[in-house]
Amino acid sequence: MSQNHFKQAIVRKPAANFAAGLTNQDASAACFETMQRQHAAYVAKLEELGLTVTVLPANPHFPDGHFVEDPVVFAGRYAVLTRPGAPSRRDEGLSLQETLARFADLARIEEPGLLDGGDVMRIEDCFYIGLSERTNEAGAAQLGALLEEEGFSWKTVAVPAGLHLKSSVNYLSDNVLLGTAAFLALPAFAAFEHWVLPATETHAANTLWINDHLLTPAGNPETEARLRAWHKPVHVLDMSEVEKMDGGLSCLSLRF
Ligand code: CIR
């Protein structure tokens, strides 16, 4: 097995009350119309890249519910409902079950396990699981058991700062990891080539590999130039309203 080639994506439209979601930023100026436009552009980009996108309706019961990456992790034949670390997000997976069952066997992280998909970074056949405010050892071990059953390996990584592992580091393929200096210094990542982000461009850590294309958030000129000088097509998307809610490109979809 190697880096996943994605055929499908699942997304959920943002709800009008999306700014009531969890965030460590100032969300007072978050604009729903802009958020809707950015989300639609994201979906259009996934479709342009050849993915079949299942678009679920907004669900105001979960203001963070469009961050579909967190309540589910795809692991071989399983779609694992993750038991997200934030109580307000714990039941988001239930609203996805019916859709997921069309594509995969359902599995579940059980109490006392906690896990957010934003903490799970797949690199080829190894899954790196961040231990963070949202993901604990029990959650990682339960996911690990399912991954082993499916022939994958896994490792835990203590997340030194920020919300999720993938808020600060992501795999770009070809052995390259893009991330902040603190994350790239972690011993678990010693074997990779490190592309350290400028301190002013940390949002670019959430650059997303899709079938050998790179999606990167707007507003990070040095990183964008470096990516463009590489040998893959680069697509820049404005994520301003998503970033106000502590999210990024990867959080907005499940890709498989
Ligand atoms: C939260 O705090 O849970 C949401 N406002 C943001 C989740 C972002 N998800 C991700 O990075 N995978």
Image (cartoon, rainbow, N blue to C red):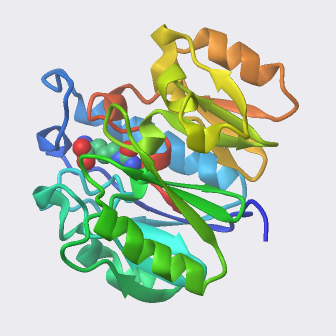
Relative to residue 68, is residue 162 depicted above or below?
A: above
Q: Is residue 136 visible?
A: yes
Dividing the picture into quadrants, the one containing residue 123 is bottom right
**Is residue 98 or residue 56 the one in the foreground?**
98
Dividing the picture into quadrants, the one containing residue 80 is bottom left
At 67% from the left and 32% from the top, the residue drawn is 235
**Residue 8 located left or right of residue 36:** right
Q: Position of residue 147 (x, y in %)?
A: 55, 77
Dividing the picture into quadrants, the one containing residue 135 is bottom left
At 64% from the left and 62% from the top, the residue drawn is 126
At 47% from the left and 9% from the top, the residue drawn is 200
Quadrant location of the C terminus?
bottom right
Relative to residue 94, is residue 209 depicted above or below?
A: above
**Residue 240 located left or right of residue 63:** right
At 24% from the left and 78% from the top, the residue drawn is 94
Give the number of marks.
0
Give ligand 1's quarter of the image: top left
Q: Position of residue 13 (x, y in %)?
A: 34, 55
Q: Is residue 71 visible?
A: no
Name, please, the residue furthest toward the front. 187
Relative to residue 45, is residue 218 depicted above or below?
A: above
**Residue 238 located left or right of residue 67:** right
Q: Position of residue 116 (x, y in %)?
A: 34, 58
